[in-house]
Image: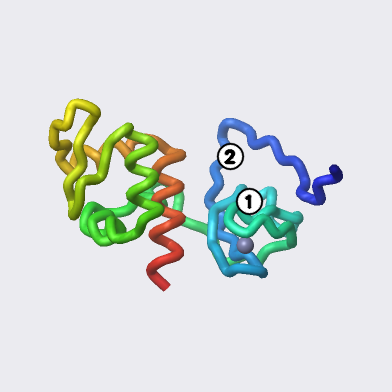
Amino acid sequence: MDDPVSPFRPLPQDHPDCIVECRACKWRWTVYQQQIGLPLRCPVCGSADRQVYVGTMGVGSGRQVAFSSFRILLDDRRVLTMIETWLTLRHVGGEQFVDAADRNVPLADIHHAIQGRAEWQGALYNVYMNRVR
Ligand SMILES: [Zn+2]
């Protein structure tokens, strides 16, 4: 099948720091500057379009979600699923997560682990960005 979305291979020094908004479902996510103006596929609804350019994040720490904000996001099933999948933990209610041996894992450790990995940090930031509007 012919994919209308243009292939793009980022260089190591490139960072996906431009925010676009899906014309169909209004989901916001980050793309590379070089992709602005090209047809892009929405990761949520799958529509491929020249999405709306919203803005560019600051260099560096732009995608961090503070611990206090992270706690608020725990009422979102998507975030709980991310944590469970990424860190192989189980949500047992409230801010409580346990590992495979049923040991309680402090929320601060979970937050730290997510912030330490760019792709997790980015995914969490996407949820955060779509909440605070
Ligand atoms: Zn969409």
From the top left corner, tell me how far across and down residue 64 is, in percent.
Answer: 35, 50
Picture quadrant where residue 107 is located = top left
In the picture shown, does residue 45 fall above or below 101? below
In depth, the one of 22 and 10 nearer the eye is 22
From the top left corner, tell me how far across and down residue 49 is, in percent.
Answer: 74, 61
Q: Going by the image, does 83 lie left or right of 7?
A: left
Checking the image for residue 14, the label placed there is 2
Q: Report helix, strand or loop for mark 2.
A: loop
Q: Earlier in the sequence, mark 1 or mark 2?
A: 2
User: Three-letter amino acid code at disc 2?
Assistant: Asp
Q: Report helix, strand or loop for mark 1.
A: helix
Picture quadrant where residue 86 is located = top left
Ligand 1 shows up in the quarter that is bottom right
In the picture shown, does residue 58 fall above or below 10? below
User: Three-letter amino acid code at disc 1?
Assistant: Gln
Q: Residue at x 48, y 56 (%)?
A: 57
From the top left corner, tell me how far across and down residue 10 is, in percent.
Answer: 64, 36
Q: Residue at x 60, y 68 (%)?
A: 25
Q: Residue lying farthest bottom? A: 133
Picture quadrant where residue 98 is located = top left
Give the Cα separation between the discs numbered 1 and 2: 8 Å
Are discs 1 and 2 less than 8 Å apart at CB? yes
Q: Residue at x 81, y 46 (%)?
A: 3
Q: Residue lying farthest right? A: 2
Mark 1 nearby-residue class (10 Å; few <14, some 14–19, many ≥20): some
In the picture shown, does residue 7 fall above or below 20? above
Colour option used: rainbow
Quadrant of the drawing holding the C terminus: bottom left
- Per the image, the residue denoted by label 1 is 33
Q: Going by the image, does 130 lie left or right of 33?
A: left
Q: Residue at x 85, y 43 (%)?
A: 1
